[in-house]
Amino acid sequence: MSLIPVGRNVRWLLLSGLVIVCDQLSKSYIAGHFDDSTIIHLLPVLDIIRAFNPGAAFSFLAHQSGWQRWFFVALALGVSVGIAAWLVRLPKNTHALMVDGLSLVLGGAIGNVIDRIRLGYVIDFILVHWNLSYFPAFNVADSAITVGAGCLLLDAFLESRRKQQ
């Protein structure tokens, strides 16, 4: 008997793995082909740049002395282990939206933790703006975490509506 029932978990492993691969490949491309002054204007509201973020979301704690690197590594690894354990234990008939949401968050967390361990910072490159108002730069991992969190919220909302009926 296997500790991890492989058949039902392949889907979430594949989705998390796909996020990690896409995240790392995109960051590698940006790091190798962009310098600090390279800007590609894709749309009037969307640019591709190269930015380094030693902090967390919105550069939270970015200007600290360096302790935040290992704090965020430990936090992301703890969350990742918790999500992986949760995914392994989910019943086979669990809503796909929940499984996909957890898988996206897991892949995004691991994608960013790879950067933190390897580089000491996260590479960001997607810059959204409106006129002179700029949203903090982000990457594929951040996008996966955000979409995954949205999936989890939507699943919780739909589940509460199902229970009311």
Image: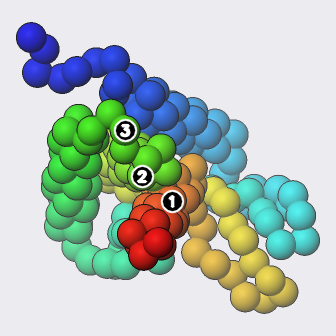
Residues at marks 1 and 2, CA–CA distance in whole angstroms: 6 Å
Q: Is residue 103 positioned above or below 49 on the image? A: above
Q: Where is residue 19 in the image (x, y as percent from the top left)?
A: 51, 39
Check disc 2 and report its element: helix, strand or loop.
helix
Q: Residue 98 carries which label?
A: 2
Question: Of marks 3 and 2, which one's residue comes earlier in the chain?
Answer: 3
Q: Is residue 156 positioned above or below 139 on the image? A: below
Residue 59 lies left or right of residue 2; in this view the side is: right
Q: Residue 93 carries which label?
A: 3
Q: Quadrant for residue 39, please give it.
A: bottom right
Q: Can residue 106 be spotted in the picture?
A: yes
Q: Where is residue 162 in the image (x, y as percent from the top left)?
A: 46, 66
Asked whether disc 1 touches disc 2, contact meaning CB atoms under 8 Å apart, the reply is yes
The residue that disc 1 covers is 151
4 and 79: which is toward the camera: 4
Question: Of marks 3 and 1, which one's residue comes earlier in the chain?
Answer: 3
Residue 117 lies left or right of residue 104; in this view the side is: left
Asked whether disc 3 touches disc 1, contact meaning CB atoms under 8 Å apart, the reply is no
